[in-house]
Amino acid sequence: MTPPVSKKYNCLIVEDEPIAAEILENFISRDEELHLVAKCSDAVYAGSLLNRYEIDLMFLDLHLPVVKGFDFLKKLKNPPLVIVTTAYHQYAVEGYELDIVDYLMKPIPYDRFVKAVEKFKYLMNAEEALLEAADREHIFISSGKKQIKIILHDIFFIESLREYIHVHTKSGTITVKMPISRIEESLDPKMFVRIHKSYIVSRSKIEVRSASMIQVNGKKLPIGRTYKPSIEF
């Protein structure tokens, strides 16, 4: 007897083509672990929905009216995981730089949709590094079937490279497959600060800082333009 599925991932469709949105809605309805919270046709409405609901996965069309998909995504501080949908090949490189889970070309075959969703679930589950945060002195990061204990005070900085993160610590570098935004959620903002889409640094380990750069453990890290206004030391 199959046990009931208890886990549900909240999804949002941002798509201005009604037929494409309907196809995605149909595909989502076939997966018992996915729950469609809402669908909308522009970035402005999508932004208000993200503020209102806890979204795990966003299906984002790039060619939206007024504000384009990637421009919208770049402005989000803590975006959900994203699967991009588009009819244009030329945006793939930029998409991977933004830590996109997957990149679906229209018209989207169902089997390709399934593969993209499996990637999403993998990031949310198997290698999701979170997160028992005992007394806030350490976290446990899941890597395969192992759990690695990381003392928070030992972390210099965390670096994102596509779907992987590298946690640079006093004892070496730990690499796991997960988006940097997921580990950011588990860290105390009094101890750590996001300075770039690819970097989180330990405040106590900062050696040098300027308007555009921070040095940690001898490595110079850039401050991202969109993060400058919110960085406080």
Image (tube, helix red, strand yellow):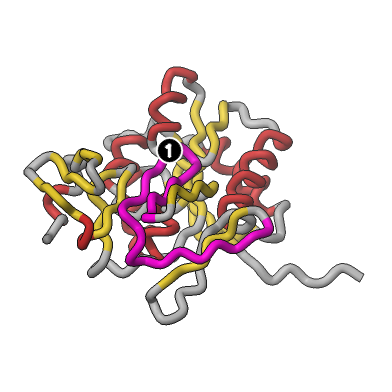
Q: Is residue 126 left or right of residue 222?
A: right
Placement of 25 over or under 148, stated as above or below: above
Side (left or right) of 101 relative to 200: right
In the rendered structure, the answer to whether residue 95 lies left or right of residue 146 reads left
- Which residue occupies 53% across, 32% down? 103
Asked if the magenta segment contains residue 150, the reply would be yes
Q: Quadrant of the C terminus?
A: bottom left
Give the percent coordinates (x, y) of residue 192.
27, 61
**Residue lying furthest right:** 1
Instruction: Give x and y (percent) for residue 199.
Output: 31, 46
Q: Residue at x 45, y 74 (%)?
A: 133
Outermost bottom residue: 135
Q: Nearer the viewer, residue 2 or 49?
A: 2
Taking the spot 35% from the left edge, 35% from the top edge, the residue there is 70
Q: Amino acid at mark 1?
A: Leu
Q: Residue furthest top?
A: 90
Residue 9 in percent (x, y) is at: 58, 61
* Crowding at mark 1 (Cα within 10 Å: few <14, some 14-19, many 20+): some
Q: Secondary structure at mark 1?
A: strand
In the rendered image, the residue lying farthest to the front is 171
Residue 179 seen in the current view: yes
Q: Residue at x 60, y 43 (%)?
A: 24
Q: Give the position of the N terminus as an image quadrant.
A: bottom right
Q: To which quarter of the image does residue 188 belong?
A: bottom left
Q: Is residue 56 magenta?
A: no
By secondary structure, the bulk of the magenta-drawn segment is best described as: strand
**Dividing the picture into quarters, in which one does residue 198 lie?**
top left
Q: Does residue 46 appear in the picture of this structure?
A: no
Q: Position of residue 32 (x, y in %)?
A: 71, 60
Magenta part of the chain = 145-170
Q: Which residue is mark 1?
A: 161
